[in-house]
Image: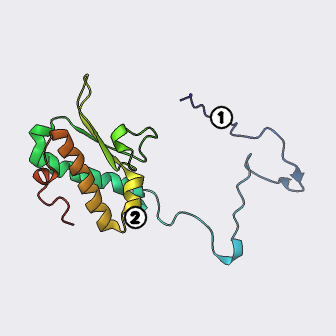
Amino acid sequence: MGTYRRAVVPKFSLSAAPDGPAGPLRNSPRPTPRRRDRRGRGLRGPLFPPGSPAHRTRAEAFDDLVLDVAQSLDRRWGKALGGTQFAVEDVPPSDPAPWEAGGVPLGRSFPAEAGQPARVVAYRRPIEARSHDEDDLADLVRDVVVEQVAHLLARAPEEIDPHFGER
């Protein structure tokens, strides 16, 4: 991936503003953007200010779901999980593993190797596409993460979570 450089834009315009009878027509060196009330629908802007709890994105809410499942599994399987990392990616990579040729994977697990800890990855977009509402999303996230942890620990998913698949 290439290096990203931000374009340097001067803060002030060096061109002179035309003068009117009472002096310069504008006081600031840069004009303010013109705001319009298009078609009588009011000015556009964010519905909730950044930082408010209602301003959370779907990705942030999904991250919290995975974190909740990881914490609950850590309470029960902490020693066996060791330093397992839980991660979220938007979509799976375009080169699936040979055993994943049947469809889009919802998650993957990677065993610990060469100094890297074990990892469990949940793919946000495929999981969201298969859920109908927020409760269904939470259940599906739990099932996907439990299934991947079971694969890592070489156990049955029902052994990891007694309520696996009951929802």
Q: Residue 68 location in percent, x, y?
A: 23, 53
Check disc 1 and give the amino acid type. Answer: Ala
Q: Residue at x 36, y 56 (%)?
A: 127
Q: Earlier in the sequence, mark 2 or mark 1?
A: 1
Amino acid under disc 2: Ala
Q: Which residue is located at x 26 percent, y 62 percent?
A: 139
Residue placed under numbered mark 1 in the picture? 7
Residue at image mark 2: 54
Residue 63 seen: yes
Q: Residue furthest bottom?
A: 40
Say whether residue 137 is left or right of residue 165: right
Callout 1: helix, strand or loop? loop
Question: Circles 2 and 1: CB distance less than 8 Å?
Answer: no
Q: How is the image coloured?
A: rainbow
Q: Residue furthest top?
A: 114
- Which x, y percent locates residue 34? 72, 60
Image location of residue 19, percent across then percent down: 88, 50
Crowd band around label 2 with a 10 angstrom C-alpha radius: few (<14), some (14–19), many (20+): few
Q: Is residue 4 above or below residue 90?
A: above
Q: Secondary structure at mark 2?
A: helix
**Quadrant of res 38:** bottom right
Which quadrant of the figure contains the C terminus?
bottom left
Report the residue at 24% width, 26% height from top. 113
Count of labels in the image: 2
Q: Nearer the viewer, residue 157 or 4?
A: 157
Q: Is residue 52 visible?
A: no
Q: What residue is rendered at 83% in x and 40% in y?
A: 15
User: Where in the figure is residue 85, as x and y percent of width and height?
Assistant: 25, 38
In the rendered structure, the answer to whether residue 164 lies left or right of residue 140 reads left
